[in-house]
Amino acid sequence: MTAADLIAMGRALELAADAASASEIPVGAVVLDAEGRIVAEGRNTREATNDPTGHAEVEALRAAAAAVGSWNLDGHTLVVTLEPCVMCAGAILQARVGRVVFGAWDEKAGAAGSMYDVLRDRRLPYRAEVIGGVEADAATALLRDFFEQRR
């Protein structure tokens, strides 16, 4: 893990808090280029857009592809506050993202090592390096507080 990863996770946590303020599940994501610079970011937007694919990771990947002018994000890192789900893991692999750094583990739907391990599945033609549990306490607290307020 790099200093840029930690800075990006801080920004992703801010985006997650913004999502919670907008009544979205608090997940934020940032895409870094090979030099560790933020090239794109996203947060959950499913409620606002009525789009089932409006996950933070997908939003950030779309923005990154637009920013770099290519769907191929080889050499990039995705930093996200929650372990990606199966849909997002598929999008990450389709975008050829080389590294994924995430905060909170998702024991119910995670696809980066907890429930499934899609990102490192050797049966697939492309795999990503995965670093989990970065700022996990802060990411978990955002999610816990959000759902406690909804009960």
Image (spheres, rainbow, N blue to C red):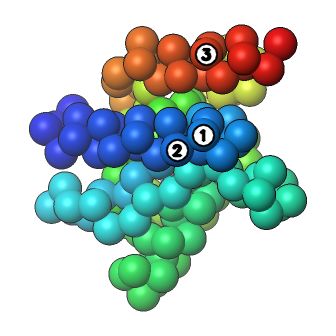
Which one is in front, 9 or 129? Answer: 9
- CA gap between label 2 and label 3 equals 14 Å
- Answer whether residue 121 is visible to the viewer in this image: no
Q: Secondary structure at mark 3?
A: helix
Give the residue pinned by disc 1. 21
Give the residue pinned by disc 3. 145
Q: Secondary structure at mark 2?
A: helix
Marks 1,3: beta carbons within 8 A? no
| Nearest to N terminus: mark 1 or mark 3 | 1
Quadrant of the rendering where the N terminus is positioned: top left
Marks 1,2: beta carbons within 8 A? yes
Which one is in front, 81 or 105? Answer: 81
User: In the image, is residue 76 above or below residue 136?
Assistant: below
How many C-alpha atoms fall within 10 Å of the one at disc 1: few (<14), some, or many (≥20)? Answer: few
Marks 2,3: beta carbons within 8 A? no
Which one is in front, 121 or 145? Answer: 145
Q: What amino acid is found at the position of numbered circle 2 in the picture?
A: Asp
Which one is in front, 40 or 95? Answer: 40
User: In the image, is residue 129 above or below residue 51?
Assistant: above
The residue depicted at 79 percent of the width and 20 percent of the height is: 150
Q: What amino acid is found at the position of numbered circle 1 in the picture?
A: Ser
The residue depicted at 56 percent of the width and 31 percent of the height is: 83
Give the residue pinned by disc 2. 18
Q: Residue 44: x percent and y percent?
A: 64, 49
